[in-house]
Image (cartoon, grey):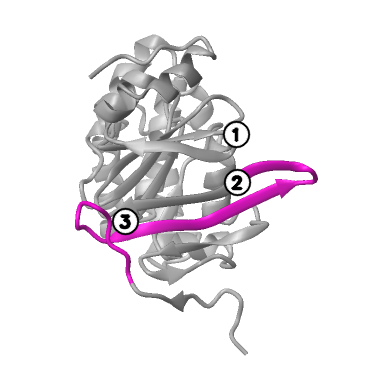
């Protein structure tokens, strides 16, 4: 009998752009009692994409991410990662397969420094064990990779500060650095600038824009400036279902999308 965590293989799907589809949901349904949080969502993330998922509060965006990553079990539907079904795979095994996420509320080790945190994650990723980070000088490749990530995410100046003492924007950057330390092929960013003070947002926005091109990114975000600057494809979710999908220009000019956002006090800017 096949183990429920064993991925089954299907034919790889290609997107409309001709690039392989690296992450796909098919008829993804999630019910909480009589409430339908995700209503038969079909979504395709292509290789190297910068894809945004937007919608009003309560649209089901984070629920969909939780289903993709295995945090929540689906009521029905399938999830495929690079052509392999992962619908019943445990969350940590999805990470090993290259599907990594960040959270709306950061989940960090408050008493550890960024260097210690990254070294620990890299050590685990390389199969060196959870204690390898304690002797930072012992594994040069671990330290080198940690320093690369500190530089990429503009954390050098706080590398030796415990997380609890860092500005909130730096903590969000550290969370993204941790995600990248897991060597993702698909990265799911859940509102990366949520709660970040205005003075710290610019650095974080620049860093999001500079994420490696070989990592396919699905972004959930309410900041429309970030969405339109970042995304090449936008999917709009309303009441748990896909309202429409298209390029930023298509979405900015879509009457249905404007009506949804105007109904919630937000205005989409043309691009």
Of marks 3 and 2, which one's residue comes earlier in the chain?
A: 2
Can you give x and y, in whole percent of width and height, for residue 18 in the image?
19, 57
- From the viewer's perspective, is residue 172 above or below residue 136? above
Residue furthest to the right in view is: 33
Q: How packed is label 1: few (under 14 Cα within 10 Å), some, or many (20 or more)?
A: some
Question: Helix, strand or loop at disc 1?
Answer: loop
Q: Are marks 3 and 1 in contact (CB under 8 Å)?
A: no
Q: Residue at x 30, y 49 (%)?
A: 216
Question: Helix, strand or loop at disc 2?
Answer: strand
Q: Is residue 105 left or right of residue 36?
A: left
Using the image as rendered, state which of residue 72 and residue 268 is in the foreground. 268
Q: How packed is label 3: few (under 14 Cα within 10 Å), some, or many (20 or more)?
A: many
User: Mark 2 and mark 1: span between their CA atoms?
Assistant: 8 Å
**What residue is shown with label 2?**
39
- From the viewer's perspective, is residue 206 above or below residue 13? above
Can you give x and y, in whole percent of width and height, for residue 199 in the image?
36, 10
Q: Are marks 2 and 1 in contact (CB under 8 Å)?
A: yes
Q: Is residue 135 visible?
A: no
Using the image as rendered, state which of residue 214 and residue 11 is in the foreground. 11
**What residue is shown with label 1?**
239
**What residue is shown with label 3?**
142
Which portion, as a residue range, is magenta?
12-38
């Amino acid at each position: 009998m096949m183990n429920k965590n064993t991925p089954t293989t299907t034919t790889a799907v290609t997107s409309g752009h001709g690039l392989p589809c690296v992450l796909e949901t098919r008829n993804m349904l999630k019910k909480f009692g009589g409430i339908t949080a995700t209503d038969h969502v079909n979504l395709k993330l292509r290789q190297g994409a910068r894809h945004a998922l937007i919608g009003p509060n309560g649209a089901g965006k984070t629920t969909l991410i939780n289903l993709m990553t295995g945090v929540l079990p689906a009521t029905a539907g399938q999830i495929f990662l690079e052509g392999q079904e992962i619908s019943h795979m445990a969350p940590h095994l999805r990470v090993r397969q290259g599907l990594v996420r960040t959270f709306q509320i950061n989940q960090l080790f408050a008493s550890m420094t960024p260097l210690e945190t990254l070294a620990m994650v890299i050590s685990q990723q390389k199969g060196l064990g959870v204690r390898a980070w304690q002797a930072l000088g012992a594994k040069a490749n671990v330290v080198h990779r940690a320093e690369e990530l500190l530089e990429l995410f503009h954390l050098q100046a706080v590398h030796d500060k415990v997380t609890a003492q860092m500005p909130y924007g730096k903590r969000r950057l550290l969370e993204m650095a941790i995600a990248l330390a897991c060597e993702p092929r698909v990265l799911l960013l859940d509102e990366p600038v949520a709660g970040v003070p205005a003075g710290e947002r610019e650095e974080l926005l620049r860093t999001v824009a500079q994420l490696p091109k070989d990592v396919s990114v699905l972004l959930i975000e309410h900041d429309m400036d970030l969405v339109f600057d970042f995304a090449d494809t936008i999917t709009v979710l309303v009441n748990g279902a896909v309202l429409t999908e298209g390029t930023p220009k298509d979405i900015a000019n879509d009457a249905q999308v404007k009506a949804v956002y105007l109904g919630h006090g937000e205005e989409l800017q043309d691009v």
